[in-house]
């Protein structure tokens, strides 16, 4: 039986998660969706769409969707849903988990990889993060949870962009891109997104393409070919007096959630790389939000694809390197105050001499 895809929806209060969810739940798309809500949320869905005042945690909705609140552990709730589905008591094709505004999506995502019983039934599709254009600059400055949510995202939706100037929106997009260059950004109006933009994004698939925003790659020239000082200096050591505390264009570089890319056309030594990544994940795992790579490994004619969330790392063999294709390893790391120099140096030393 096919695995049930799961989408994690995260974002700060007021970013429009409930609006997006209502749209997903009430639209006549013919899909049966189970929504799991963390019930500490200040903005509950139920008043408008749901039949409330019920003792049952799981509520069937008029359009065939289901909604339940988590009173215990997410695992227990998922197992309950799966069991009811197997017995024919509930019918749903996919799950959306709405996290509370302050939640760290990391442990939620890890549930789908660490728990065998969950992994046999559900497949984590992607983490969507909603960002409120009007309040994001303050939230990102003040709240690490908001920065983490951006770092985890496979797709970023920016709501309320009509309430800010085009310049403010551009500055926000630039800032988000430096925090997370692998998540596409889309400005949306009150949940007016098609379901194709929300579901089946395959953010956790081990696929052989590493989507990094091309502009971001131009900002960070190949580290091993000398730096082009285009944007790099402000990014790494922002102690330039003119940038201190200034809420101008460069201020975003002070965010503790940052990303960087490693590229090399030399092959990796598998044993050295495994030892190095193992050590790094051991020490910095809690601060590593998302990381992914498509690697050229000595000893195989196929691409090696790896990715991780916090301490959990997995890899797989991808397709063959095509004839004439440049065998270039590319990795992106997104995390909180990661020691870029140590990481780049360690990766460099894991290449075949």
Image: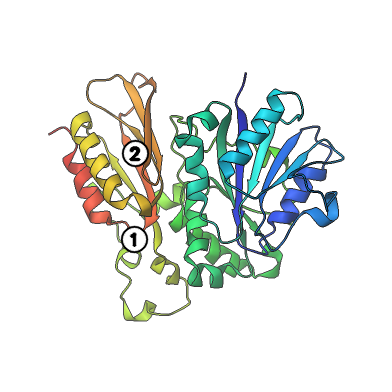
Image x and y of residue 137, in percent: 55, 70
Badge nearest the viewer, 1 or 2: 1
- Asked if residue 199 lies left or right of residue 139, the reply is right
Image x and y of residue 82, in percent: 65, 30
The residue drawn where x is 31% and y is 35% is: 329
Viewer-proximal residue among 220 and 189: 189
Res. 214 in view = yes
Q: Residues within 10 Å of mark 1 (few under 14, many from 20)?
A: some
Q: Residues within 10 Å of mark 2 (few under 14, many from 20)?
A: some
What label sits on residue 337 in the rendered view? 1
As helix, strand or loop, the secondary structure at mark 1 comes to loop
| 50 up-or-down from 294: above or below | below
Residue 118 falls in which quadrant of the image? top right
Give the total number of marks visible in the rendering.
Answer: 2
Residue 63 falls in which quadrant of the image? top right
Res. 225 in view = no
Residue at image mark 2? 330
Image x and y of residue 294, in percent: 36, 33
Viewer-proximal residue among 56 and 238: 56
Outermost residue, front direction?
55
The residue drawn where x is 45% and y is 44% is: 212
On-image quarter of the C terminus: top left
Tell me the CA gap for discs 1 and 2.
Answer: 21 Å
Viewer-proximal residue among 46 and 330: 46
- Asked if residue 189 lies left or right of residue 204, the reply is right
- Circles 1 and 2: CB atoms closer than 8 Å: no
The residue drawn where x is 75% and y is 55% is: 19
As helix, strand or loop, the secondary structure at mark 2 comes to strand
């Amino acid at each position: 039986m096919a695995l049930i895809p799961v989408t994690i929806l995260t974002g700060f209060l007021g970013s429009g998660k409930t609006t997006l969810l209502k749209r997903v739940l009430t639209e006549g798309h013919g899909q049966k969706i189970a929504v799991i809500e963390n019930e500490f949320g200040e903005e509950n869905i139920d008043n408008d769409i749901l039949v409330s005042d019920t003792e049952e945690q799981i509520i069937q909705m008029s359009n065939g969707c289901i909604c339940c609140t988590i009173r215990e552990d997410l695992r227990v709730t998922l197992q309950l849903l799966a069991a009811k589905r197997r017995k024919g008591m509930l019918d749903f094709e996919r799950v959306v988990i709405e996290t509370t505004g302050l939640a760290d999506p990391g442990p939620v995502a890890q549930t789908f990889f660490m728990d065998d019983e969950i992994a046999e039934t559900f497949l984590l599709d992607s983490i969507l993060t909603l960002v409120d254009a009007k309040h994001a600059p303050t939230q990102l400055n003040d709240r690490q949870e908001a920065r983490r949510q951006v770092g985890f995202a496979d797709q970023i939706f920016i709501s309320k962009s009509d309430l800010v100037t085009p310049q403010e929106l551009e500055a926000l997009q630039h800032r988000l891109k430096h925090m997370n260059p692998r998540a596409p950004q889309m400005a949306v109006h009150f949940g007016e997104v098609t379901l194709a933009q929300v579901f089946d994004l395959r953010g956790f698939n081990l696929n052989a393409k590493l989507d990094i925003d091309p502009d971001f790659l131009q900002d960070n020239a190949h580290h091993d070919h000398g730096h082009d000082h285009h944007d790099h200096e402000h990014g790494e050591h922002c102690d330039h007096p003119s940038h201190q505390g200034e809420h101008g264009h460069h201020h975003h570089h002070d965010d503790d959630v940052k990303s960087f890319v490693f590229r090399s056309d030399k092959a990796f030594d598998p044993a050295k790389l495994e030892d190095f990544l193992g050590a790094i994940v051991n020490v910095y795992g809690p601060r590593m939000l998302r990381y992914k790579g498509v690697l050229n490994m000595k000893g195989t004619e196929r691409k090696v694809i790896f990715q991780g969330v916090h301490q959990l790392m997995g890899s797989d063999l991808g397709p063959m390197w095509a004839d004439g294709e440049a065998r270039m390893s590319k990795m992106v790391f997104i995390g909180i105050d990661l020691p870029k120099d140590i990481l780049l140096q360690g990766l460099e030393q894991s290449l075949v001499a």
